[in-house]
């Protein structure tokens, strides 16, 4: 099937790339929403003993669809999780139990956090962390640069924190499974302490330096011009940071008040996510000594320019 063709409906396995390292299949999970687009993309890499990337939400229908996507005689030998958000990781324990395959990831839901984000997490509950899979525990840890192979496929891990501390991208012979780090249809939410804007920007640079030929994101269509999309996202974030700085020239403000002022074209239902992104930008500005919180660093704090 051409990669620019309309996606198959949820639960239907579709071949995206036959022939390369055994080929690539996608099964769309039945979890559409404003935050997930059409739903989570679960990818099957290779043939025979295959790798499964991002099992998706804990849903009986999706579990059955993933197992039905296998050809006779095939088995899932490895289950990779790009990061510990429930729309990517929650089905992993049940899929592992059904297949006997180990679950591989960078770490649990707290892995990869900076010291600053760890301190923030100790002082207040993660803001907007309702999507985090706090129970997630991988069977095997995959570090940056690790290569995992099985059958006719091979994947190399790139640790790309930012959207989530334990976020991994997976290089597949020059094409990259990018999880929620880079998507074509939407920007990624960066919600501290699980999200870290400074780390996110550095991870964008890291992915650009890898010069991927194509991105296979956790939601939405493949990104056919990765370097252009990464540059677009970088400029977008830089523009948001400038807008926040300009707004703070009018006086101290909270992340929510700043979001209401800056994200004027954002639907009300997504304003909370916009405020979390704003908070992430404010923390990055604080790390650069360009802004400071009045009192403890927290989501409810007022920030001012230094």
Image (cartoon, rainbow, N blue to C red):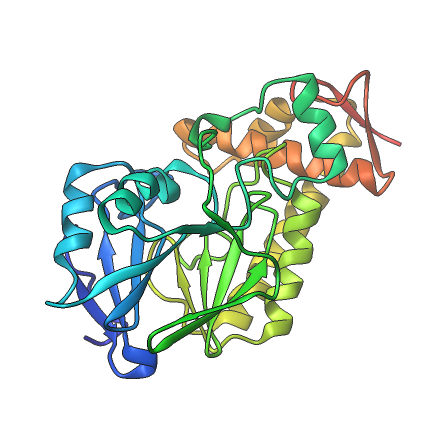
Answer above or below: position of 269 versus 6.
Answer: above
Instruction: Give me the residue at 14% from left, 47% from top.
Output: 64
Q: Quadrant of residue 250?
A: top right
Look at the picture and state if 208 lies above or below 105. Answer: below
Residue 5 seen from this side: no
Query: Residue 170: where, in percent of width, then height?
Result: 48, 64
Residue at the image position 65 percent from the left and 64 percent from the top: 206
Quadrant for the C terminus in the image: top right
- Identify the residue at horizontal 76%, vertical 31% (top origin): 248
- When asked about the image quadrant of residue 283, the answer is top right
Question: Which residue: 81% across, 39% down?
Answer: 287
Task: Give the image location of residue 295, x and y in percent.
Answer: 81, 16
Residue 249 falls left or right of residue 120: right
| Residue 121 in picture, x, y percent from top left | 65, 25
Picture coordinates of residue 61 (x, y %)?
14, 41
Residue 173 in sight here: yes
Q: Residue furthest bottom?
A: 19
Figure check: 142 above or below 121: below
Say whether residue 155 is left or right of residue 205. Answer: left
- For the image, the number of numbered tags is 0
Q: Nearer the viewer, residue 120 or 185?
A: 120
Q: Quadrant of the N terminus?
A: bottom left
Name the foreground residue: 280 vs 73. Answer: 73
């Amino acid at each position: 099937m051409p990669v620019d063709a309309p996606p198959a409906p949820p639960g239907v396995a579709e071949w995206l790339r036959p022939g390369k390292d055994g080929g690539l299949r996608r099964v769309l999970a039945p979890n559409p929403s404003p935050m997930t687009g059409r739903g989570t993309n679960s990818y099957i890499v290779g043939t025979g003993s295959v790798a499964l990337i991002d099992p998706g939400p804990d849903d009986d229908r999706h579990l059955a669809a993933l197992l039905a996507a296998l050809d006779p005689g095939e088995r899932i030998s490895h289950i990779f999780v790009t990061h510990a958000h429930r729309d990517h990781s929650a089905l992993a324990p049940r899929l592992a139990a059904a297949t006997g395959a180990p679950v591989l990831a960078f770490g649990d839901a707290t892995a990869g956090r900076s010291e600053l984000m760890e301190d923030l997490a100790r002082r207040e509950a993660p803001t907007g962390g309702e999507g985090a899979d706090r129970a997630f525990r991988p069977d095997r840890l995959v570090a940056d640069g690790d290569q995992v192979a099985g059958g006719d496929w091979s994947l190399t891990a790139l640790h790309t924190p930012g959207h989530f501390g334990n976020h991994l991208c997976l290089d597949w012979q020059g094409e990259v499974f990018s999880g929620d780090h880079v998507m074509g249809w939407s920007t990624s939410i960066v919600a501290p302490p699980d999200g870290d804007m400074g780390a996110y920007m550095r991870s964008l640079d890291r992915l650009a330096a890898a010069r991927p030929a194509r991105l296979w994101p956790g939601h939405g269509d493949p990104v056919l011009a990765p370097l252009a999309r990464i540059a677009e996202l970088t400029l977008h974030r830089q523009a948001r940071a400038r807008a926040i700085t300009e707004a703070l020239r009018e006086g101290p403000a909270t992340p929510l008040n700043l979001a209401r002022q800056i994200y004027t074209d954002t639907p009300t239902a997504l304003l909370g996510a916009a405020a979390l992104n704003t908070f992430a930008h404010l923390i990055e500005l604080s790390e650069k000594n360009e802004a400071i919180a009045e009192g403890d660093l927290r989501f409810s704090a007022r920030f001012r320019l230094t």
